[in-house]
Image (cartoon, rainbow, N blue to C red):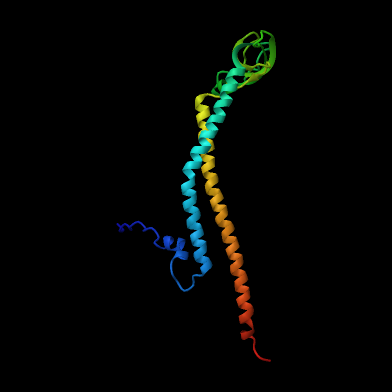
Amino acid sequence: MPARLPPPSPPTELPRLMFWRLRRNPLRRRSDLAQAWIGVGLLLAALAATTPVMFHVGDTAHGHYSRIAQQQAATRHHTTATLVENARRHPEPGSAEARETRYPARVRFPGPNGRAHTATTDVAPALPKGSTIRVWADTEGRITEPPLSPDQVRDRAMGSALVAALAVHAVAAAAYGLAHHVIQRRNLAAWDTEWARTAPRWRTSP
């Protein structure tokens, strides 16, 4: 039976490659050290800003969606609607797909002022004319989604906070990329200048 090989050890050169600009070596330029410290500064700034930005954006978003939920609750009501036509039949009645499928059908429902309204909404397959369903409607007699629930408000606020955290790190990465681009252009310009001074020495005499 062949001997089992030990698991490979993690590469030890990776940290050295990541921070080579911070180590003293004959090839390191002042621009390399500046770029390294810019990267460290942006990383620390992004880490320090992430939590405050998340809390601020999340709190602002929670207040915003809470106000929307309150407005929706004040302008929408849950009512009973009656089908004015037969709903479409599913080709596979009783199947799992049929239980999940909904088809558009015309319904009539009372508005907040007692006036009857007619609209189209999705209903279960094969519902006969005259069946009743529960729908949400607004003050203008349109069928709408239910008001935002507390869980939906919380989820949207958390989503906004997460997007804000990602945006902080994206801005830091973009700033580092811009700094790298500027430094590289200066390095190339300096290299061109030095080469212009050195190139004549390499020319052979006629």
- Residue found at x 42% / y 60%: 15
- Residue found at x 51% / y 38%: 56
Give x and y (percent) for residue 41. 49, 56
In the image, farthest residue toward the bottom: 206
Q: Quadrant of the C terminus?
A: bottom right
Q: Quadrant of the N terminus?
A: bottom left
Give x and y (percent) for residue 174. 57, 53
User: In screen coordinates, is 130 left or right of 10?
Assistant: right
The quarter holding residue 124 reads: top right
- Give above or below for 93 relative to 206: above
- Residue found at x 48% / y 44%: 50
- Give above or below for 115 relative to 50: above
User: In screen coordinates, is 12 left or right of 167?
Assistant: left
Decide if residue 124 is in sight here: no
The quarter holding residue 69 reads: top right
Give x and y (percent) for residue 31. 53, 66
Give x and y (percent) for residue 132. 61, 10
- Return the residue nearer the eye: 37 or 81: 37
* Count of marks placed on residues: 0
The quarter holding residue 134 reads: top right
Decide if residue 57 is in sight here: yes
